[in-house]
Image: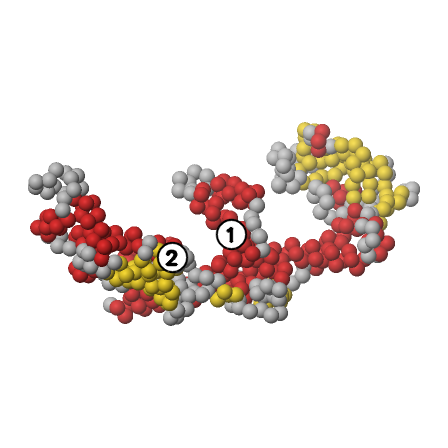
Amino acid sequence: ILGMSSEATASSGGIKSILTKLPDSQIELTIPVPGEVTKLAYEKAAFEVAKELSIPGFRKGARVPANIVESTLRKAGNVNGLRGEAVKALMKQLVESAIKEEHGLDPIGAATPLTPIEELAKNFQPGEPLDLKVKCDVWPDISWKENKDAEQPYFGLNGSYKRKPFNQQKYDAAIKDLCDRYATLAPMEEGGALAMGDACVVNMVGFMAAEDGVSKADPLPNAASGEDVEVILGPGRYMEGLVEGLVGAKVGDTRIVTVSFPEKLRDKTLAGKKAIFDVTVNEASHRSTPEVTDEFAEKVRAGMTAADLEKELRKAIDDEDAKEFVDERNEALAKALADRIDVDVPDTLVTNSAREKYAVMMTDMRDNGMADDEIKKLITPENFVQYKKVVKDDICKDFRVSMACDEIARLENIDVSPEMVDEQMTALKKEAEGQEDFDEKQIRGKVESTLQRRLVFDFLAEKANLEVIYSEEMKFDEGLLEKLAQESLEREEAAAATETEA
């Protein structure tokens, strides 16, 4: 971690640079440039500048003495131009290599000289030593807070999130469906009438219904009719009207049954239409479904008990419902994870992220009907500084979580399969069909990053101590509400800053 006042020296190419570590992952670098190096930089700058000048007495491209080049520039009003070029060349030659190669750091953005280039150029003397002092944000190191109670510092994350309670209706339906699969049939007594819950085997001959809804019209396709068709008398199983029309029928009876085909039927020629069937009952059976006992569970899977069956089924249903609240779970994990990591957030990254958010906020204001003139009044350096203060904490938290996820993925070998990425890319390409600005390379990188973060959160969830709060009142998205409130506050503060300035 970059400290407040620690210093380091390193050497490269015979020049030692002095590194001072500053807060927020920033460094100050001092490079004492020897006189022979400043002289060489000055002469090289003169050679390069001379290529672009027409100097009397010298053909274009010829080597011109540096003092003549500088004199020519001075006459043109560019007093310290050549010396400024020499300083820039030294910056380019020495600063980045000192940061990367000498000190092993990864710079973020360009280094900024502590003294403006113009001032350095004014005092620059070829052949005289020069101290180059710059500041630069660098990519921060990661340090995990100690966690004595877990194998890894990111295990055992604590938090809570809300979700809907267990879906008992879905569980009851699943149990019923499972029992239906193991239902047994017993022949119905002679003369017995079909009732709900019974089963029968029928022949069906279908016709389209005429305009009056009662008379038969054209015969239906063979696929809509059939012989020895098994029908279980239960709600919601077949076309509306079929089961109801068979209640009370006996073996040998032929019923005229009016049905309605579903609106979403694949065959669009029949979807939503009425039809009339002649249905003849060939066989009738009483149908009974088993109770959920250990004996029944053994039939489902060898060695399974009724308690095991219930536990597995409840877990499967709960896991499926939990997918709806993965974002809430991940937000709880992210909040806890951000507190487990020590990392300085570079101001360059905070500023860039704040600019993106600020631009989005302005776009939202325009979309919500605010006039362009009013929006332009809000876009001032002072307003942006105020906005940056408001969003800085959230940006820093997101950055810490992002770095932590990347590090966990590296340590735990959590990789995204190419198939997962390709599947997402195919869907996105389809959505963006016809859009010229679809940057596949950039979007693929974002997809890979998003999928990897999901996998990391899934991994962390298995190791976490999360409390799930089951709540009946889930009528609104609390996270969305908080976001909207925050954005509203930011707009008000930006507007207030503008009014104060005015």
Q: Would you say residue 449 is visible in this rendering?
A: yes
Q: Is residue 401 left or right of residue 307?
A: left
Number of marks in picture: 2
Indicate the quadrant where residue 36 lies.
Answer: bottom left
Indicate the quadrant where residue 151 lies.
Answer: bottom right
The x, y position of residue 414, in whole percent, is 57, 52
Task: From the viewer's side, name the closer residue of 160 and 490.
Answer: 160
User: Dot 2: few (<14), some (14–19), or many (≥20) neighbours within 10 Å?
Assistant: some
Image point (25%, 58%), residue name: 34
For numbered disc 1, what is the local secondary structure? helix
The x, y position of residue 464, in whole percent, is 61, 64
Image point (51%, 43%), residue name: 425
Q: Quadrant of the N terminus?
A: bottom left
Q: Give the residue at mark 1.
A: 450
Task: From the viewer's side, name the closer residue of 127 and 426.
Answer: 127
Q: Would you say residue 472 is visible in this rendering?
A: no
Q: Quadrant of the C terminus?
A: bottom left
Q: Give the residue at mark 2.
A: 102
The amino acid beneath tag 1 is Thr
The amino acid beneath tag 2 is Glu
**398 above or below 78?**
below
